[in-house]
Image (cartoon, rainbow, N blue to C red):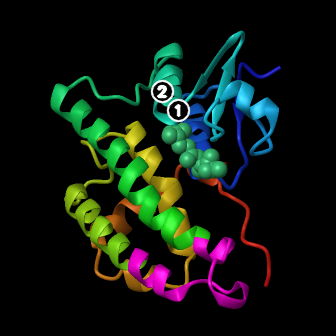
Amino acid sequence: MSEIVIYGPPQSTFTRTARMVCVEKSVDYELRPIELGSSELLALQPFGKVPAMRHGEFTLYETSAICRYIDAAFPDPSLLPGDKQQRACTEQWVSAISDYFYDDVIRGWVLQYIFPSGPDGQPDMAAIGASVKKSRHHLEVLNAAYDGRDFVAGNSLTIADLFIAPIMTYVGRMPEGPEVLEGLRHIHQAGEAMMQRASYTKTLPPPPPEQ
Ligand SMILES: N[C@@H](CCC(=O)N[C@@H](CS)C(=O)NCC(=O)O)C(=O)O
């Protein structure tokens, strides 16, 4: 039996972040699918979101808390910098990704293609256009933050990078992805490095169904 159980679907970006932490820490984990809205999920996560986590009798929700717990409960490598400023920077990016990036890239853009809300069941292209514009702004800020490094909060991998990677996978899969990423060379460099990691390749979400 695996030591950690992560509850959530493989498509979920936050669930993938928790899984990537497990892989980076070499923690044996099981991904257990769970139905959104089910009483099983509400018993683990009273707000009805994924992921949730179990470690023995201990259960936990909120991705940032789950990542920090796994980081602290298992041996090195540590995914939170010891340096005060780099640690604060890690927190800053976890928060920015969970709020601004998740809202505009995932909710406003990616999910509009998956669950279209426009006329005749088509994607609402005006809504997508507005979210793409906001996403470009966010990505320019991220690009500047890398400043030529492979990691966003210093010179080594932190949980912030593992919040970013699942979102970037979906950006790359969107029709507007290449245009939105144009000229953002630091993001391309960091993305190339991230794509080599086992935590990235072992947790890739399934490709979208053929239309
Ligand atoms: N604050 C939560 C957010 C989790 C979240 O929004 N997860 C998404 C999937 S990536 C979800 O559960 N969506 C389903 C829904 O909103 O009903 C966390 O950090 O874990």
Spot the residue most to the top. 57
Residue at (55, 67) in percent of width and height: 170
Answer with the quarter of the image where residue 61 lies: top right
The x and y percentages for residue 78 are 40, 25
| Residue situated in front as seen by the camera: 47 or 73 | 47
Name the residue that disc number 1 marks.
Answer: 62
Disc 1 beta carbon < 8 A from ligand 1? Answer: yes
- Decide: is 48 above or below 104: above
Residue at (25, 31) in percent of width and height: 87
Q: Residues within 10 Å of mark 1 (few under 14, many from 20)?
A: some
The x and y percentages for residue 101 are 40, 59
Name the residue that disc number 2 marks.
Answer: 65
User: Which amino acid type corresponds to the residue marked 2 in the rendered image?
Assistant: Ala
Check residue 131 in the rendering and tell me which mark sits there, or answer none: none
The x and y percentages for residue 43 are 73, 25
The magenta segment: 112-131
| Residue situated in front as seen by the camera: 30 or 51 | 51
Q: Residues within 10 Å of mark 2 (few under 14, many from 20)?
A: few
In what element is the residue under mark 2? helix
* Side of 171 relative to 207 (left or right): left
- Decide: is 115 above or below 192: below
| Residue situated in front as seen by the camera: 175 or 112 | 112
Residue at (26, 64) in percent of width and height: 143
